[in-house]
Image: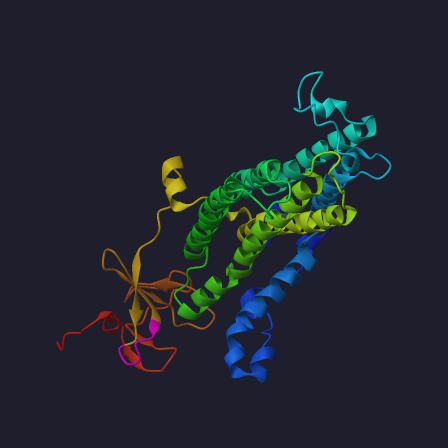
Amino acid sequence: MDGQPEALTTDNKDTIEMIRLSDFPINNNLSKINKKLDFFTPIITEIQYQTYQIKTFWGRNEFLIISLGFFTILLGSWDLGIGELSGGGDYNRSGLFGSESGFLQIEDFALILALLSSISWIGYFSLMWIYYPIMRENLVYLLLSSIIIQLGYIRSHAESPDFPVESSLSSIIYILVVNLIVFFLAGFVVHRAVLETRDIHVKQKHSHPDPRIFENGKLDHKLRIWTFSLILWVIFLNISSWSGSHSVSPSPGDLDFSYSLVIFYIITGMISMVLFLNIIWYPQFMLGSSEESILSSRARVISGTIIVEEEFERGKCPVCNQETTVRKDSDGLITIPCNSKDCGGSGEIGTKCEECGEEISARIVCINCGSDSPVGSHFGRVDAW
């Protein structure tokens, strides 16, 4: 990770020392109970690590976004003292625009709350657009996913008010289709873009001649829990959209308004909003200002933002076959790390180290088995003469 981006450095949080995942304490409590449960050790550790990051680095910006999200849902579903939702409204009027539209025929107080809820929605997404610039394109995709799922449940309930009970085939198909669209946008477009940008970032920013350090760099950028958050968001988005539509779907006269269902809608809606914030925040936090935007490889080609990656072959110890710190580029030039203590320089055989000036040795010691062998033997067969 590269630490926090500039937009997140609030409340003096830029002075907090960053703890990397590779340095975070491993939670192996389950493996102590049963060795077979050791599979869950890295997952639990990553959950605790991301929880720690949220507790440490979420500040005023995130609190403001969550607060707007809460008021968005609360204002849009408030009915106590108004009776607009519980009364069923006037089913002879519909639409949003025009003097005779159904939207303008609701109670004055309900109309005010609806307008305030709409303003809060705009503020909620505008703040994320401002604070997390490298996720802007993906924010649009996820916003479209959210709207599509909600429209799908509204359409299904319009045909089958008790959906999914006694539902028509077309109502079920609506939900399947919108979820397939969301799967494509969130699971294929957004998820792929974040993972591919992460891979490019690790190769460019965290490549190191020592394989162990490079492996730690890859570990620090694991996205398993972020992926799980994306899946959970889609699930809670479905639940929230269903409960919101289900609470007002019966026609006037048949409406048995359930405040408990509205409360369930508010709770699940808030959970989905918090998950949504984490989905947008974490890639920005992980990659920081080192990326201009998070795009898939195909999108980079289309936009002209093509990343040229350095191609090289990493040497392997002729004794134990462990990857070593020796590298050979596409032109056949072999680069070896300097053997001097506390020096991070490198160079070709027989040349001077670019940092400390010491001569680069033609032999190297394997960090795994300790064998001392010629550099050339780390790239296949070595001639006897």
State the image quarter where residue 332 is shown: bottom left
| Vertical side of 209 occupied by 294: above or below | above
Q: Could you tell me which residue is drawn at 49 percent across and 45 percent down?
A: 176
Q: Position of residue 266 (x, y in %)?
A: 72, 47
Q: Quadrant of the N terminus?
A: bottom right
Q: Could you tell me which residue is drawn at 69 percent across and 58 percent down?
A: 56
**Horizontally, is 310 left or right of 248 in the view?**
left
**Horizontally, is 14 left or right of 284 in the view?**
right
Q: Give, as a single range, the part of the protein colored magenta.
A: 318-323
Q: Position of residue 4 (x, y in %)?
A: 60, 52
State the image quarter where residue 378 is shown: bottom left
| Vertical side of 56 occupied by 186: above or below | above
Q: Is residue 322 magenta?
A: yes
**Horizontally, is 76 left or right of 298 in the view?**
right
| Vertical side of 107 occupied by 242: above or below | below
Name the foreground residue: 90 vs 15.
90
Q: Main secondary structure of the magenta part?
A: loop
Q: Residue furthest top?
A: 99
Tell me which colouring the rendered structure shows.
rainbow
Q: Position of residue 333 (x, y in %)?
A: 25, 60
Regarding residue 77, the answer to whether it shows in the image is yes
Q: Could you tell me which residue is drawn at 82 percent across and 35 percent down?
A: 83
**Horizontally, is 78 left or right of 156 in the view?**
right
Regarding residue 292, the answer to whether it shows in the image is no
State the image quarter where residue 123 is shown: top right
Q: Is residue 40 magenta?
A: no
Q: Residue furthest right?
A: 81
Q: Could you tell me which residue is drawn at 34 percent across and 53 percent down?
A: 310
Name the foreground residue: 134 vs 38.
38
